[in-house]
Amino acid sequence: MKKQKNATNSKKKIADEILQQIGGSVIFVFLLIAAVAVCMVGWLSISSKQTELIQESNAASNQLTGFLEQYTKNAEQLAANPEIKSAMLETTAGKNFYQAETMDTIIENLIGISETDTENVMAVWASDLDTSSLVQSDGFVSEEGWDITGRGWYGCIETKAPILTEPYVDSSTGKMILSAAAPVFDDATGEVLGAVGMDIALDHMTAIMEEYKIGRSGYMLLMSENGIFLYHPQSDMIQKNITDVDISQNVIQAVESKSDKFLKYKTEGTTKYGSLQQAGNTGYLVLSCLPFSEYYATLAGMALALILIFAAGTVLIAVSIRKSSAKLTKPILELNYTAQQLAAGDLDVTLQITSEDEIGELGGSIQKTVSRLKEYIVYIDETAEVLAQIAEGKLSIDLKHDYVGEFQKIKTALLNISGSMNKLMLGINESSQHVSVGASELASASQVLAEGAEEQAASIEELTATTITVAEQVENSRKEAEASAKATKQAAAVIEQNQEKMKQMMKAMDNIHETSQQVVGIIQTIEEIASQTNLLSLNASIEAARAGDAGKGFAVVADEIGKLALESSEAANTTKELISISMGEIQKGNDIAASAMESLKESVNAISHVNGLIQETAENAAVQAENMNQLRAGIEEMAHGIQDNSAASQETSATSQELASQAEVLNQMVQKFELC
């Protein structure tokens, strides 16, 4: 029973199937909703952070714009002062700007303006263009040689519009200041007479930037029009240009293009987010900064909370489905256990299923089936008793009960088995007797056959020994014939080589003969030359005789030439005779070599004929050796066959005896059955 339960536990359970199918779908939808919720929360969180950074940058830029524009407007109002215009019109090149009639009034106005905002205004000034001179509210006046064109605010004269200068360090106070300057115009001509302005301390601007705190660690950066840091939480970064610090290129490009952008960038290896905003028309820029971790902190916290909530919900759903499916499958497990008992043949089972659903109906049906099976136990008991009688050898049976339904087939089958077994056992008994007699006769015949096979095997062994001896002799003859053929073949090869050498010698003698013929031709040419030379010598002698005393020396030379020609002719004749003798000897050698060549050819033909005969003898000996090997193999195969027949005959004899013994045993076993 425990093994069955363990087998059930190792299979898939309905509760697990329900959890996988229904729970899987529910959990998938739940997780999909969770993913969508996380994405939406993330989008809202990131959007809110981006909006916050943009709004902070806008607020800072607006505040900075309002702060700077008031001084720009003050400078424009000061440029419209009639006393200043009158003094600049009065002062022309070569005159002293400080000696203008309205100068005292101008200085009082400058001092009055500076005292209205002593915290931020460092000085108020007026500068004349013609005399390149300046006067300030703090009593500073320019010295001789002071150049107005070298001032940072000179751009307002060139552009004829108010400007804010790049910040610079005041030499007297050491503070960072900037100048708000405006051009002074001649109302009549519209020409620029000079400039007025005020120097503003950046302390208030940096204080404005310090007040802005974004999140826990976010901050604001203030930059000039040229990208110079005017405020930075790190004091060593102030007065540095943005191109000289470790910051992403997209920030540098945005500053250079003076465009309002939301940026993701890196500075000093840290990823940050921020919004770059222009401070109105002042040219100054504000950049908000928020670290990556804090930018996504809200998103991470909300995502973690949602993940935990959805994880808890998923676990709760899985547990609920598991409990419901377990409650649903409990009666099914009980039905399965009952079915296993019935399959094992145990009909003494009871079901206690109180469910009112389809499972309860199934339990009631199984209980009715069990009750009906118990009624059939009587048939099963009688059937088992009858089968036990048949197993004991009692083939004659008697069934007492009337079988109904499908059990009627069992009764009929048992009666048919009884009749068939009776007929079968009677047939086996009769056949076993016949088999016993036949096996005895077969054993006797097999014994006689085995004895004859042994005698044939002995004769075959003697014949095999004789054929082996003959085969060895034939093999030796074949080997000797092959050796003789090989020796004659080598002799023929040697003679053929000598014949080839004789051919080469004859060819060499022919070459000598041809060469001698050529030499004879050359000697004939020499003889002709000697004859011509002799003729020339005679002609020379005649001409020398005609010349008289003047030709005596030439006559001597001609005589010597004649002698030399005669000697050459005689030597040529001697050489020709010797060559004729050599050619005769060469011809004799050619005749002897030709005769020797014919003899070698006859020797080669004779040896080739002998070699052919020996080769044919060797081939015949090889054929005879092969035939003897085949004969020996056939005799050995016959010997093995006879030995196998002898062994088979002996084995058949033993088998026949065993068959007779087994037939007797079978007959005794059949006698145990009670036949009708």
Image (cartoon, rainbow, N blue to C red):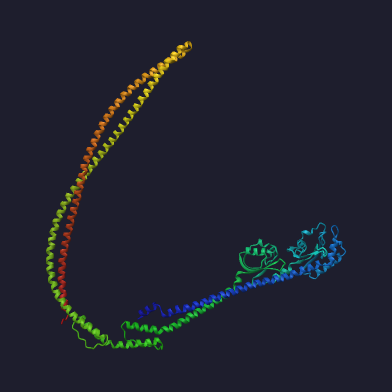
Q: Is residue 42 left or right of residue 650?
A: right
Q: Is residue 597 above or below residue 202?
A: above
Q: Quadrant of the C terminus?
A: bottom left
- Can you give x and y, in whole percent of width and height, for residue 630 in the image? 19, 53
Q: Residue furthest top?
A: 549
Q: Quadrant of residue 545?
A: top left
Give the x, y percent position of residue 407: 26, 85
612 versus 126 height, above or below: above
| Tally of marks | 0
- The residue drawn where x is 31% and y is 33% is 504
Quarter of the image where the N terminus is located: bottom left
Mark yes or no: residue 284 visible.
Answer: yes
Residue 301 appears anywhere in the view: no
Quadrant hosting residue 224? bottom right
Q: Position of residue 656 (x, y in %)?
A: 15, 68
Counting from the top left corner in percent of width and height, residue 593 is at 27, 31
